[in-house]
Structure formats: C-alpha cells, structure tokens
C-alpha cells in the first residue's frame, strides 16, 4: 500500500510540475548562470518540499538520483516532453554555460509550444463535441419521437421527409450500437495512426485536413528542436540524430529521409533536404531561404523560434475551417430532423381533421 501511494504521489507531482515547467526551467537556468550546481538547487527543493509539501518530496528525490547518474533529461522523466528531453541532452553535452542558456531559452519556448498544443486540442475537441452532441440528439429523436408518431399514423402515409426520417431512425434503432462502435473505432484508429502511419499515401494525406494539423504541429516541434540544438553548437546532422531518440515513428521516417537527402552530392543547401513532406510548402520555402543566407545557422535558429507563432495562427485558421464545416453539417442535420418532424405532424393533424369530418358527416 505505501508503495502504491508513493507511485500515485510521484505521478501527480510530476503532472503538476509539467504544467509549471516553463518557470521551473527558468529557475534552473538562472541558478546555473549564478554558478550554483543543479544538485545543490534540487537538494534545496527536496528539503523545502519535505517541510512544505511532503507529497512532492519523492519527485525531487527521484530527480536527484537521475541527475547523479549524469542525465538531467532522465531526471526530468515524466515532466519534460520528449522534445524538451532531446534539447536538454544536447545542451548538457555542451557544458553548464550552454545548459544554463538553453534552459532559459527553453522556458520561453515552452509557453509557446503549450499554446500550440492547446490550439491543436481545441481544433480536435470542438468538432468531436459537436459530433457527439448531435449524434445523441439523433439517437434520442429516433428512439422517442419517431415511434410515437409511428403509433399515430402508419409510416407509409408520411410525407417524403418524414419517411426519410423514419428510415434513418430505423437504421439507428436496429444498428445504432454497431454504427457507434464503428465511429469510435474509426476515431481511435485515426488518433493511433497519426504518429505511426508512414508511406506515400500518408504523405499525400498530410496535405489535407485533419492530417495537416498533426503535420504542422510535429514539424514546428522539430524545427524548434533542431534550431535550439544548432544554437548550442550542435551540427544539423547530430541534431537530427538526437531528435530521432524521442520522435514518433512518423517523424523518424521523415528524419531518415532528411538525413538521406543531406548525404546526396547534389544538395548544396541543407534546406533542400527538408523537402520530404514533413512540413507545409510555405515552411519548406522558409527553411530553404534560411539555408541560403550568409549565416544559415543563425537564420535557421531565428526561423525556428518564430515558427511557433506562425504555426499557432495556421492551426487556428485550420481549426476555424473545421469548426465552420461541422456547424454547417450539424445545422443541416438539425434542419432535416425538424423539417421531417413538422411535415409529419402537419400530415398527422390533417389526417385527424379529415377523419373527424368524415365521422361528423351523416351517412
């Protein structure tokens, strides 16, 4: 039981610090700039946590053990993202001065990358919420309203829209469970395939929504990772090799193609090597232009830092397109349901009036 409690506390503490890691990176970098060793800083945090917040003490103790093994990225397991672990590995290899500068720089970029992640989640969550909401409305309508109307008037006497609505309600009533399972499986399969599916077909699909959202997100993180490592003096090829360590299968596939392109003799500028479909055409052009500057490394670093803001705006634009499309689709579905329902009820009322008149007419 105590071991289970420690595991739970460690998980919750890491999750909480992950939300505040931008300030945490800045504090670590600032102490390093003042020539205070990381072991001393983390030991102070551990001592402070034991008296103020004992549940987090184990997290800092785990950090100290990982740091004593020589790896800050391992010490920050569960706190830093895979991209951030790659950058920490690169800056740590360059020395304390480079690590201090890298941690301060990373604290500034983390806030922007978190904003990009939040934008991507919103782009996916809003359409899914609308889809679930209107699916629930259709199911509720099919199992409650339509059967009542069918009891009052035979469906074959309904108007065209009413008969169409009845047919859809019968499909939902008899096969709704399987349709729901198929939709859930499709969404789960899509989310599973995003970071894993590779090949020529995936490369073509990455040009279109919703695959392009993930492509832009992953390429922005790659650019940040590469530019940050190159900023610390790491070569482009070494930066690519380090990026593969924590990359998804989809990104690894592109990185291998980039490295293969770099090895070709007919690639005078490294920007040409990035024409693998890992990023949009606009970003490919920017990378190509940066590689042709007088100081290509400095230009690439500046472009990588600025790419986050551009990607956030691009994701917001794509999200608005998806959201408008979903609103239009849901509006059409709602209009069809209401039109079918009211057309049927009007026909039902007319039938009742005709029946009343025929009964009132003397034979």
Image (tube, helix red, strand yellow):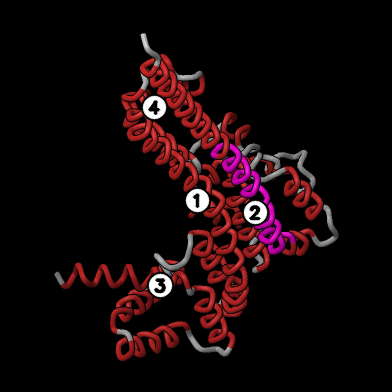
Neighbor class of circle 2 (other Cα within 10 Å; few <14, some 14-19, many 20+) is some
Pointer 2 with pointer 4, Cβ within 8 A: no
Label 2 or label 1, whichever comes before in sequence order: 1
Neighbor class of circle 1 (other Cα within 10 Å; few <14, some 14-19, many 20+) is some
Q: Please state, as top left, top right, bottom left or bottom right, where the C terminus lies in the image.
A: top left
Label 2 or label 3, whichever comes before in sequence order: 3
Decide if residue 128 is in sight here.
yes
Left or right, 121 with respect to 9, comes to: right
Label 3 or label 4, whichever comes before in sequence order: 3
Distance CA(mark 4)–CA(mark 1): 27 Å
Distance CA(mark 2)–CA(mark 1): 13 Å
Q: Which residues are magenta?
A: 303-330
Pointer 2 with pointer 1, Cβ within 8 A: no
Decide if residue 238 is in sight here.
no
Distance CA(mark 1)–CA(mark 3): 22 Å
Identify the mark at residue 16; answer none if there is no mark: 3
Identify the mark at residue 169; answer none if there is no mark: 4
The residue depicted at 55 percent of the width and 46 percent of the height is 251
Report the residue marked by disc 2: 316
Q: Is residue 241 magenta?
A: no
Label 1 or label 3, whichever comes before in sequence order: 3
In this view, 306 is above or below 195: below
Left or right, 224 with respect to 3, comes to: right
Q: Nearer the viewer, residue 224 or 115?
A: 115
Q: Secondary structure at mark 4?
A: helix
Picture coordinates of residue 324, whole percent (x, y): 63, 44
């Amino acid at each position: 039981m105590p071991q289970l409690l420690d595991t739970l506390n460690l998980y919750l503490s890491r999750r909480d610090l992950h939300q505040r890691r931008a300030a945490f990176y800045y504090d670590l970098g600032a102490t390093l700039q003042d020539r205070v060793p990381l072991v001393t800083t983390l030991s102070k945090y551990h001592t402070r946590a034991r008296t103020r917040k004992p549940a987090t003490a184990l997290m800092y103790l785990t950090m100290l053990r990982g740091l004593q093994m020589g790896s800050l990225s391992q010490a920050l397991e569960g706190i830093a993202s895979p991209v951030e672990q790659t950058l920490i590995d690169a800056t740590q290899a360059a020395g304390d001065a480079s690590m201090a500068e890298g941690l301060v720089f990373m604290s500034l970029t983390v806030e922007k990358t978190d904003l990009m992640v939040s934008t991507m989640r919103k782009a996916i969550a809003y359409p899914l919420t609308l889809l679930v909401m209107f699916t629930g409305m259709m199911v509720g309508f099919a199992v409650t309203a339509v059967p009542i109307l069918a009891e009052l008037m035979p469906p074959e006497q309904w108007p065209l829209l009413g008969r169409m609505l009845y047919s859809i309600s019968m499909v939902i009533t008899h096969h709704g469970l399987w349709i729901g399972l198929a939709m859930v499986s499709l969404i789960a399969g899509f989310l599973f395939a995003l970071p894993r599916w590779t090949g020529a077909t995936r490369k073509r699909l990455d040009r279109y929504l919703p695959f392009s959202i993930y492509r832009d997100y992953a390429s922005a993180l790659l650019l940040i990772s590469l530019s940050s490592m190159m900023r610390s003096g790491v070569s482009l090829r070494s930066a690519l090799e380090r990026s593969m360590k924590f990359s998804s299968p989809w990104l690894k596939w592109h990185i291998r193609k980039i490295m293969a392109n770099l090895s070709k003799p007919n690639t005078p500028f490294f920007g040409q090597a990035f024409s693998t479909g890992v990023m949009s055409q606009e970003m490919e052009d920017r990378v190509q232009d940066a590689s042709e500057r007088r100081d290509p490394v400095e230009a690439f670093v500046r472009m990588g830092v600025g790419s986050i803001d551009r990607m956030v705006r691009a994701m917001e634009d794509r999200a608005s397109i998806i959201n408008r499309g979903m609103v239009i689709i849901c509006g059409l579905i709602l209009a069809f349901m209401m039109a079918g329902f009211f057309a049927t009820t009007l026909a039902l009322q007319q039938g009742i009036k005709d029946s009343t008149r025929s009964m009132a007419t003397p034979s």
